[in-house]
Image (cartoon, rainbow, N blue to C red):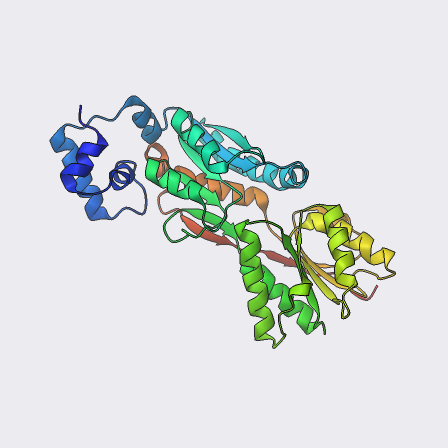
Amino acid sequence: MVGIRDIAAHLNVSVASVSRALNNHPYVNEELRRRVVESAKLLGYQPKQSGRSLRQGVSKTVGFMIETHPKLTSNIDLFLMSIFDGVQTVMRRHALSLVVLPCSGDEDPVEYLRGVVERRFVDALILSATRPNDKRVALLTKEGMPFITLGRTGFRDKQPWIDLDFESFAEQSVDRLYRSGNRRIAIMVPAGPLNFGQITLVGYQRALEKRGIAFDPALVAHVVLDEASAASACNTLLMNADPPTGIILINEALASGVYTCLRQSNLEPGRDVEIVSLEDGRLRSLPSPLTRFRFATHDIGIALGESLLSLVPAFAHYYAGTEFQRLWQFEVVEPTDLNT
């Protein structure tokens, strides 16, 4: 029986290239795709049932891989639940199911995903918690499974993704704080290898340089995305010989901890220390004003779902022209009054 390895040998190309061509991957050269299809017909290639299911969407299931951690799960859930709802909005149009695939903190994400791929119980995948050198992307590309990432990776030019424009968030935040008279501007970003934290730092440093402000590593706090970690980091920042007068928060879950820390130090958020933060709804309950960068998580979920299904041949015609790589912009919400 002829397999994709035979086609690859016939064309003198890699097995991964043949797999991507047969699965209608968007980044396959059209000439290569034509040669693969013609060779498959010539050699009498018949896809295995599992492969046919994958390409035609027969399992009617899409997977969303997340990574869980006891200290992160509660805050991540608030963000991801709205994303899930947006993805499900798209899946319901086609009677597809969305399954969440939680990889625990003590598991290797690549090996976890390998097990998912080998079982072949999903037609396509959405990955979150991306890293600069994300080996999951290489795995799915090699296997020819349709996928999209929530967040960029080091392979951003060669794979589908949707991400928030964290560089712009950092640059605009520094700019707004600078224009308010701040020169000591701190930032809180997630500890660990997550790509969005590193991207945010790049934008932060670029904005400081543009304003002629020297980068001070003492003003960068690497935190767990929860209230206690934010309060501890804020306290460390305030102990600096020249403490910050402005703080940028990468996640709204940090705001309560920062507010608590500032008030325990007899400082009023917004008046004594200006705060800029991302927001998905929770910050609206905080009493003191701050500049917020808001994003529509449900709409991001819809975009993820549509982009992903455009990569699955059975559904691609519904989403012709859909973007495979997209930076999601923020809505800036101004504080009502920074002097009260």
Residue 302 screen position, x and y as percent:
50, 41
Residue 194 drawn above or below residue 83: below
Residue 273 drawn above or below residue 282: below
Q: Residue furthest left?
A: 42
Please state which of residues 278 and 95 is positioned toward the viewer in this rendering: 278
Query: How many circles with numbers are drawn on the protein?
Result: 0
Q: Quick one: quadrant of the N terminus?
A: top left
Q: Quick one: quadrant of the C terminus?
A: bottom right
Residue 142 screen position, x and y as percent:
33, 39
Residue 118 screen position, x and y as percent:
39, 27
Residue 279 screen position, x and y as percent:
66, 51
Q: Is residue 27 left or right of residue 307?
A: left
Residue 70 drawn above or below residue 180: above
Please state which of residues 87 and 250 is positioned toward the viewer in this rendering: 250
Q: Is residue 168 left or right of residue 55?
A: right
Viewer can see residue 89: no
Please state which of residues 122 and 330 is positioned toward the viewer in this rendering: 122
Residue 23 drawn above or below residue 295: above
Q: Is residue 224 left or right of residue 338?
A: left
User: On the image, which quarter does residue 198 sit in?
Assistant: bottom right
Q: Is residue 254 left or right of residue 102?
A: right
User: On the image, which quarter does residue 60 sit in?
Assistant: top left
Viewer can see residue 208: yes
Q: Residue at x 77, y 50 (%)?
A: 257
User: On the image, which quarter does residue 222 sit in?
Assistant: bottom right
Please state which of residues 8 and 173 is positioned toward the viewer in this rendering: 8
